[in-house]
Amino acid sequence: QVQLVESGGGLVQPGGSLRLSCAASGSIFSINYMGWYRQAPGKERELVAGIRSVGSTNYADSVKGRFTISSDNAKNTVYLQMNSLNPEDTAVYYCNARDVRTVSGRYVDVWGQGTLVTVSS
């Protein structure tokens, strides 16, 4: 089994910053891709940012220049540094690990339970 545990959400004022963390644990041999998605009330889940094991990244246009995704492959952990937050960033943020190869040779995709980010004065 593979689990993802997110942390770092909370309440922040507009213009503020937060850093989210997502740690993968379990019978992991390797992870090809980890990403952050978010879902605001009444909206569909959307990709925020992703990072491959080789280090390449991708971002939603709405967060480019404000959010930075990084990873520590040795710890199977991905981070999302969020700066210049605005109320439109309010959402539940979910971590996703894709093409996770387990020690038994299986490939799985895994989601975290989500962490709430609220941007409000």
Image: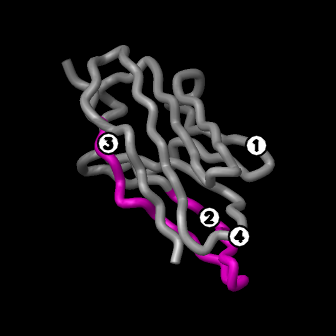
Label at residue 28: none
Cα separation, mark 3 vs mark 2, equals 21 Å
Quadrant including the C terminus: top left
Q: Is residue 109 above or below residue 7?
A: below
Q: Marks 2/4: CA distance?
A: 13 Å
Q: Secondary structure at mark 2?
A: strand
Instruction: Identify the disc placed on residue 56.
Output: 1
Residue 114 forms part of the magenta stretch: yes
Classify 10 Å Cα crowding around label 1: few (below 14), some (14-19), many (20 and above): few
Badge 3 amino acid? Ala
Lower position in the chain sequence, tag 2 or tag 4: 4
Residue at which label 4 appears: 29
Tell me whether the residue at label 3 lies in contact with that at label 1, contact meaning CB atoms closer than 8 angstroms: no
* Residue depth check, mark 4 versus mark 3: number of the one nearer the observer: 4
Is 116 situated left or right of 94 in this image? left
> Magenta region, mostly helix, strand or loop?
strand
What amino acid does circle 2 point to?
Answer: Arg
* Residue interval drawn in magenta: 96-117
Q: Label 3 belongs to which residue?
A: 91
Question: Distance from label 4 to label 3 (Cα)?
Answer: 31 Å
Amino acid identity at mark 4: Phe
- Which mark sits nearer the N-terminus, 4 or 3? 4
